[in-house]
Image (cartoon, rainbow, N blue to C red):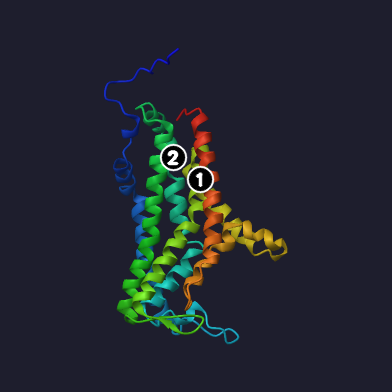
């Protein structure tokens, strides 16, 4: 017995519904995208002013030199410092915003059901929105170090990257290391992106999805400080969020970043699977 194909309009192809360029254009025109870009662009200028007003950006703690101590040594050092002060919280916000606001905002505007009636298959809709959200998140991750490198070079000159462990890396190699750092920061934020995206599929409140993802990320950071948890902390993505510091030493060390990437990607895949499974069965009324 052969199955009868479902009736569909002539020329209808599910894979061509809601093209990525359409979704990207919609997200690009939103005010919150411009606000995020403005904040990330202005931060390096704020840091330059802060260092100029405050003098020595670092200090010595029991003779130990930190990344902050060499912030004004060169443009590369300034870019690394900008990432360091932003990775714990500031860079979490655009990721949660771009991935958590995407589906919930459609529901809050009562336009989600019309998209599905277009008809856009549910899996296609989620895939388009998640892809665009991740692309915008990656752009945010890239924007900050690029602007910081340019601003830092203008303010402090183009030179080698002074390492906290001692020694220095030539400017060309320093740029490559900063690329590794930026890539790892993005990968480490995949779990936040997936968490925000999952919450976006279960709530009609965009602020609830974004705030929930940011809040749970903060909870993870707090739990990582509880030393009584011992080795259990290694299961927390927050435990590995600063493993990129291993790239700022004479010999690039990959082990911590590999473990951190594995934890983040594994958790992200589980959360994305929950999002697709739950949304596929959801009764969309808004």
Do residues under tags 1 and 2 come within 8 Å of each other at their CB atoms?
yes
Q: Which mark is residue 103?
A: 2
Residue at 39% across, 29% down: 116
Q: Quadrant of residue 2?
A: top left
Element type at mark 1:
helix
Q: Quadrant of the C terminus?
A: top left
Element type at mark 2:
helix
Residue at 54% across, 44% down: 271
Question: What is the C-alpha distance between the residues marked 1 and 2?
Answer: 10 Å
Q: Which residue extends farthest left?
A: 11
Q: Between residues 137 and 27, which one lies in front from this camera angle?
A: 137
Residue, disc 1: 209
Residue at 52% across, 61% down: 258
- Residue 75, visible in the rendered structure: yes
Within-10-Å neighbours for mark 2: few <14, some 14–19, many 20+: many
- Above or below residue 61? Residue 141 is above
Q: Which residue extends farthest bottom?
A: 63
Q: Position of residue 181 (x, y in %)?
A: 44, 66
Mark closer to the chain start, 1 or 2: 2
Q: Quadrant of residue 157?
A: bottom left
Viewed as shown, does residue 237 lie left or right of 168? right
Within-10-Å neighbours for mark 1: few <14, some 14–19, many 20+: many
Q: How many marks?
A: 2
Q: Position of residue 34 (x, y in %)?
A: 33, 54
Q: Position of residue 24 (x, y in %)?
A: 32, 45
- Above or below residue 264? Residue 202 is above
Q: Which residue extends farthest top?
A: 1
Viewed as shown, does residue 36 lie left or right of 193? left
């Amino acid at each position: 017995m052969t199955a009868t194909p479902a009736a569909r309009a002539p020329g209808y192809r599910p894979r061509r519904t809601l093209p990525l360029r359409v979704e990207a254009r919609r997200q690009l025109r939103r005010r919150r995208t411009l606000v995020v870009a403005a904040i990330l662009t202005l931060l390096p200028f704020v840091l330059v002013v802060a260092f100029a007003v405050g003098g020595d950006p670092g200090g010595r703690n029991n003779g130990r030199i930190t990344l902050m101590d060499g912030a004004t040594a060169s443009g590369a050092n300034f870019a690394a410092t900008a990432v360091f002060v932003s990775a714990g919280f500031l860079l979490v916000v655009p990721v949660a915003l771009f991935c958590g606001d995407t589906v919930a905002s459609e529901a809050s505007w009562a336009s989600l059901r019309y998209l599905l009636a277009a008809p856009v298959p549910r899996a296609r809709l989620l895939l388009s929105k998640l892809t665009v959200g991740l692309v915008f998140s990656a752009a945010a991750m890239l924007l900050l170090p690029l602007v910081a490198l340019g601003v830092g070079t203008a303010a402090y000159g183009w030179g080698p990257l002074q390492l906290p462990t001692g020694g220095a890396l030539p400017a060309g190699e320093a740029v490559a290391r900063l690329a590794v750092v930026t890539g790892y920061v993005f990968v480490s934020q995949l779990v936040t992106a997936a968490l925000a995206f999952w919450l976006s599929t279960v709530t009609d409140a965009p602020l609830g999805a974004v705030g929930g993802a940011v809040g749970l990320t903060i909870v993870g950071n707090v739990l990582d400080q509880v030393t009584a948890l011992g080795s259990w902390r290694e299961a927390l993505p927050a435990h590995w969020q600063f493993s990129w510091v291993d790239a700022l030493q004479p010999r690039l060390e990959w082990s911590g970043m590999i473990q951190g990437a594995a934890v983040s990607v594994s958790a992200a895949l589980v959360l994305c699977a929950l999002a697709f499974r739950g949304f596929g069965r959801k009764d969309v009324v808004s």
